[in-house]
Amino acid sequence: MRLLLVEDDAALSAQLQPQLEQAGYAVDWADNGVDGLFLGETGDYDAAILDLGLPGRPGRELLDRWRAAGRAMPVLILTARDTWRDKVDALKAGADDYLAKPFHPEELLARLQALIRRSRGRADSRIQANDLQLDEERQQALLPSREPIALTGTEFRLLRYFMLHPNRVLSKTRLTEHVYDQDFDRDSNLIEVYVRRLREKIGTERIQTRRGQGYVFVNQD
Ligand code: CA
């Protein structure tokens, strides 16, 4: 899943990024309002974390303009201000949740996961497709009458993206965008390697190859 983090506090961002990545998110970081506005308007994100006090443009303006541009990803607002008026303003402007600094990264992660689940209409932390379950907390795949299947970080991100977008052709480019961070070497041929490994772990029939187009994760439910 791809996440946009707009936060000018470099120390906070440096602390958050590895934790977000470990939780399975590919993170794009913008340290000012101008870059954050552009990324949020043009990128394909599953969620955004947005600081209100930013250089360049205020976070509130970013939120307004993303929403005006039809961007519907869940947005969690971060701010040092903690007055009821700021919270009400942010929520009215279309934010989905609100966290006042300082906060525990664990709380941010839990709220973020809940936001993304809600935005996809799910209430629990397991994703199901046919008899396959993905446990997001433990980053394991579960199949009936088998031991839990351990997944590497990349395998987990790839499988989660497949399971959340079943029965659609997903190009290697799109998968690469949602599995790697912006700084990574985005060699889309690596996706083939990871798809092969996933097939070895969960069964070959679940991920079909569409020659020249990409892959389809099959869910018959
Ligand atoms: Ca700030």
Image: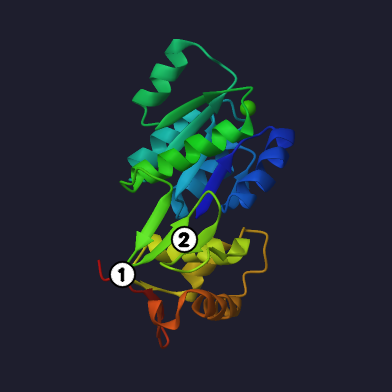
Q: Residue furthest front?
A: 145
Within 10 Å of the Cα at label 1, are there few (<14), some (14-19), or many (20+) other Cα atoms?
Answer: some
Give SS at disc 2: helix
Q: Nearer the viewer, residue 15 or 104?
A: 104
Q: Is residue 159 left or right of residue 73?
A: right
On the image, which quarter does residue 179 sit in? Answer: bottom right
Q: How far, Cα to Cα, is label 2 from label 1?
A: 13 Å
Residue 74 in view (yes/no):
no
Residue drawn at 39 percent across, 82 percent down: 205
> Residue 141 at what x, y percent from top left?
49, 63
> Residue 153 at what x, y percent from top left?
61, 61
Q: Is residue 186 left or right of residue 92?
A: right
**Amino acid at circle 2:** Arg
Ligand 1 quadrant?
top right
Mark 1 = which residue? 219
Residue drawn at 59 percent across, 49 percent down: 23
Query: Residue 160: which numbered mark, if any?
Result: 2
> Residue 154 at what x, y percent from top left?
60, 64
Q: Mark 2 or mark 1, which has the lower sequence index? A: 2
Q: How is the image coloured?
A: rainbow
128, above or below 191, in the image: above
Is the shortest distance between ligand 1 and the CB of mark 1 under 8 Å? no
Quadrant of the drawing holding the C terminus: bottom left
Within 10 Å of the Cα at label 2, are there few (<14), some (14-19), or many (20+) other Cα atoms?
Answer: many
Give SS at disc 1: loop
**Amino acid at circle 1:** Asn
Residue 179 in view (yes/no):
yes
